[in-house]
Amino acid sequence: MQRIDVERRRRMSVSPSSDGWNAQAGFALVSVLITLVALTALATGGFLISNVDYRISQNHSASARAFQTADAATYDHLGTNRRGRDTVAYSYASGGARVAGSLLIDIGDGNTLHRLNANSTHRPPEGGTAARNITVVAMLNDANFRARAAITAGSGLHKNGSSGQLYGFDKATSTDCTAGPQPAVAGVGTGPGLYTQNGSKAVPDGSPPVDTSMSGLDQLKALGIDWAGVVNGTVVTPDFYLPADSWPDFSTIASDWWPVIYIDQASYSVDSGHSGRGTLIARYDLKLNGNFTWDGIILVGGVMTSDGKQTVRGTTVTALNMLMGQTVPGSSVGNGNKEFSYHSCWVRLAAQQFVGGLVQVPGTWAEAM
């Protein structure tokens, strides 16, 4: 009996107790759980870091797109806008941009400096908004458009009667523009023998009164007008295209806007209700009636007929279709006490928005913060 008890105690001494086994198993489970938590934390941290990196990349991409949009709008504005103080909105696949211009200084002789501010935003699908701002200084100039006469008539000009003015002495003053009056031009520029007149008193006056030093076609060529480009729409984009558009109401538009009006009709008549300023372009024939007044430039592809009391201050050119190889009859300045006079300031202001434009001043591009 005693031997059996000894053997039983010996076996119990070498067999693990249930409490010891449970303790070891619990420790192992805790270790596994800690490891799982650590791995989960590492995975979560890695995901968060990756997500942050992704958002940083997305923000950088959105900012780059906004920058590219603002830059594109700046140069689109420089290439197409003919006024320094306009605010224009541009739309692209990458977002929208708004370019606003403001006058810095008038440096004279038809040239002004303007500051352009381009603001762009881009909204990525992930949310948020990226914004960039670009500023540049640009000069608005008149592209050196210069008149040679109060009226340059490529196919000739007939004046009926001795009243009125065909006047080449500059009527501009220092109040009109800082440059003031410029040297006189001819009263009429045309080919030899192509100016005719009824009446005892010669109407043209200027330096010379009538310039017949070259043919009518060469008179037109000397102006340097790309008439084919004007007709084809590659030189200028009209502000108003008639007859599709209505004639602008000059009482409601900005006083510094000298718009370009293009008339694409076989024969078009204007009268006192069409008075205004800027550049008036008639693809074919143009009739001036009644008390029509115009400040700036008139370009006529065909025949101009003036009947009534008109006042045109700037410069007028007729028969420009001759530059495209077409035959054009002579123009006529009929009855009435009319005035066609040279005005250099009105020519410059009209030319700025006809063939001039904004040109970036080197070294002024900057990103506004």
Image: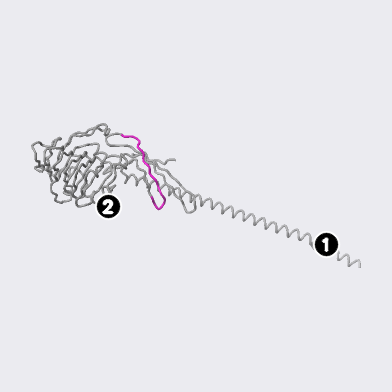
The answer to which image quadrant residue 148 occupies is top left
- Residue 244 is tagged as 2
Span highlighted in magenta in the image = 91-106
| Above/below status of 20 relative to 279 | below
Amino acid bearing label 1? Ser
Q: Is residue 22 left or right of residue 289?
A: right
x and y percent of residue 216 in the render?
A: 13, 44
Q: Give the camera-side residue of 233 and 343.
A: 343
N-terminal label among 2 and 1: 1
Amino acid bearing label 2? Ala
In this figure, which residue is indicated by the disc labeled 1? 13
| Above/below status of 256 relative to 57 | above
Q: Is residue 40 left or right of residue 305?
A: right
Quarter of the image with the C terminus is: top left
Q: Is residue 60 left or right of residue 216?
A: right
The secondary element bearing badge 1 is classed as: helix
